[in-house]
Image (tube, helix red, strand yellow):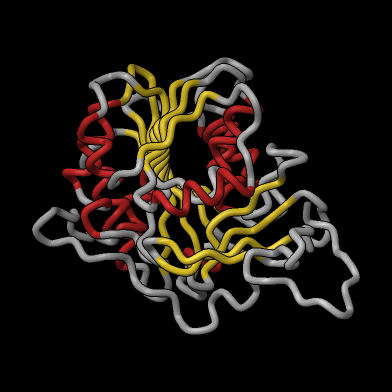
Amino acid sequence: MGRERRAPRRRPSSDGFEADGVDTGGPRTRRTETGLAELVPDRDHPQAWSLLLDGAPQSHVDLADPTRLAFEYQRRLGHLIDLAAEPGKPIQVLHLGGGALTLARYTAATRPRSRQQVAEIDTGLTEWVRAELPLPAGAQVKVRGADARAVLERTPEGSVDLVIADIFAGARVPAHCATVEFATLAARVLAPGGSYAANITDGAGLAFARAEAATLLAVFPEVALIADPAVLRGKRFGNLILAAAQLPLPLAELGRRVATDSALGRLEHGAGLVAFTGGAAVLTDATAVPSPAPPPGTFAAAGGR
């Protein structure tokens, strides 16, 4: 899978196969409930693929090495998975947003026997991804085709060690998954010592990110934010990772991992994070709006959300 093949007289179809069923290793597309999904091969890694939805990069999966996280936002979430418990210890994880199941694969590889549930509203996307990029044998991953907040509401209290929210409708975080009511639901399902992590995007002015940080600070006593310094200055549109918990976060080790990552990143917490919010109002179900749409050309380089 994923190897380039010479076929001068034949063009691959939209699913990446020639008419006789031979895998061309080219891009594969499928129309799903939420848009046009595309799997694009990574030419540097023969068994790796990027998932795009309507042109926006969503996930990157390396079937040969599920611990290799190519997108910077996924690596930062990977740090939080690594620090959720002692190395290798199985944990209970609730993934809100599935995509190509990259972080579920990562957890299964780094924490064998972990029990994981994924909420992904696009059942067609899940079926296609699991057929094209099968989960490794033994991975205890259950995918539920439902709205992320609905799954969160039905999750038993105190049953999860880590909640990861990577929820996007198109390239925007839905309003109902960014509110204080949503954060309260997430806090409810966490076991003692559990933590919450969220991937969001924002750009100039950072109004959404500031409000989301203020919202989590209204629910959790411990909150931290990780992002590229240029994103934090509002110089470019990009990802911001928020981590929250009732108990102190492993900030020293998290900071070390962020500092040594190949992508430039900055960790904000405490007074610095409060200052970052700039007095932004807490988001509620009555007032929240989706995160801003990416500016035109944001995904031209296909670097991830």
The answer to whether any part of residue 164 appears in the image is yes
User: On the rendered structure, is 53 left or right of 196?
Assistant: right
The residue furthest front is 20
Could you tell me which residue is drawn at 61 percent across and 78 percent down?
Answer: 300
The answer to whether any part of residue 269 appears in the image is no
The residue furthest bottom is 296
Could you tell me which residue is drawn at 52 percent across and 24 percent down?
Answer: 140
Total numbered labels placed on residues in the image: 0
Q: Residue 141 appears at what percent x and percent y?
A: 49, 29
Q: Is residue 189 above or below residue 205?
A: above
Which corner quadrant of the image does residue 155 belong to?
A: top left
Q: Residue 204 appears at what percent x and percent y?
A: 41, 76
Which corner quadrant of the image does residue 28 belong to?
A: bottom right
Q: Is residue 184 above or below residue 212?
A: above
User: On the rendered structure, is 142 left or right of 302?
Assistant: left
Could you tell me which residue is drawn at 51 percent across and 74 percent down?
Answer: 236
Which corner quadrant of the image does residue 81 belong to?
A: top right
Could you tell me which residue is drawn at 22 percent across and 43 percent down?
Answer: 182
Q: Residue 121 appears at what percent x and percent y?
A: 34, 50
